[in-house]
Amino acid sequence: EFKSVPNPVKGKETLSLRFSPAPGFELTVRLFNTAGELVSSTRAGAGTGSCTLRHEALAPGIYVAVIDLRQGEVLMRRLSLKIGVVQ
């Protein structure tokens, strides 16, 4: 299970993705705007339970976070979440 906390994110709040860590899995999060352009990307190492996305430079709007769970080079799962940014 993945959660975006808080959602929507406002002003200088920190946007965190929280999830149940799976041993040996690496997490990559890519954030896209509504035009499909990549605006942010981050990685979390194996066994961690959260990652933080930088959003300070983002315009207000709706974004899609694409979350990839990998074990080595193998993509095990891909999820997407809608995230709102309010300034």
Image (cartoon, helix red, strand yellow):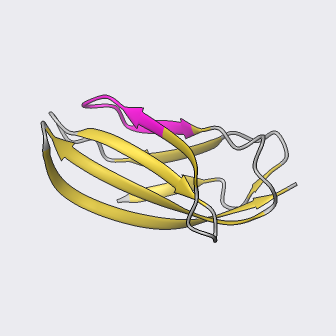
* Left or right: where 9 falls relative to 54: right
Query: Residue 23 is drawn in which quadrant?
Result: top left
Magenta run includes residue 75: no
Q: Residue at x 12, y 36 (%)?
A: 72
Span colored in magenta: 42-52
* Relative image position of residue 68 (x, y in whole percent): 31, 52
Q: Where on the picture, by quarter, is residue 4?
A: bottom right
Magenta segment includes 43? yes
Q: Is residue 7 left or right of residue 81?
A: right
**Residue placed at 88% from the left, 54% from the top?**
87
Does residue 52 sit above or below 38 in this rendering? above
* Relative depth, front residue between 54 and 37: 37
Left or right placement of residue 83 versus residue 28 in this view = right
Q: Position of residue 70 (x, y in %)?
A: 20, 45
Instruction: Name which residue lies at 70% across and 44% down.
Output: 55
Residue 21 vs residue 75: left or right?
A: right
From the top left corner, tell me how far across and down residue 37 is, in percent.
Answer: 58, 59
> Is 61 or 49 nearer to us in this picture?
61
Q: Quadrant of the N terminus?
A: bottom left
Number of numbered callouts drawn: 0
Residue at 56% over, 66% down: 36
Query: Which one is in front, 61 or 11?
Result: 61
Q: Position of residue 39 (x, y in %)?
A: 61, 49
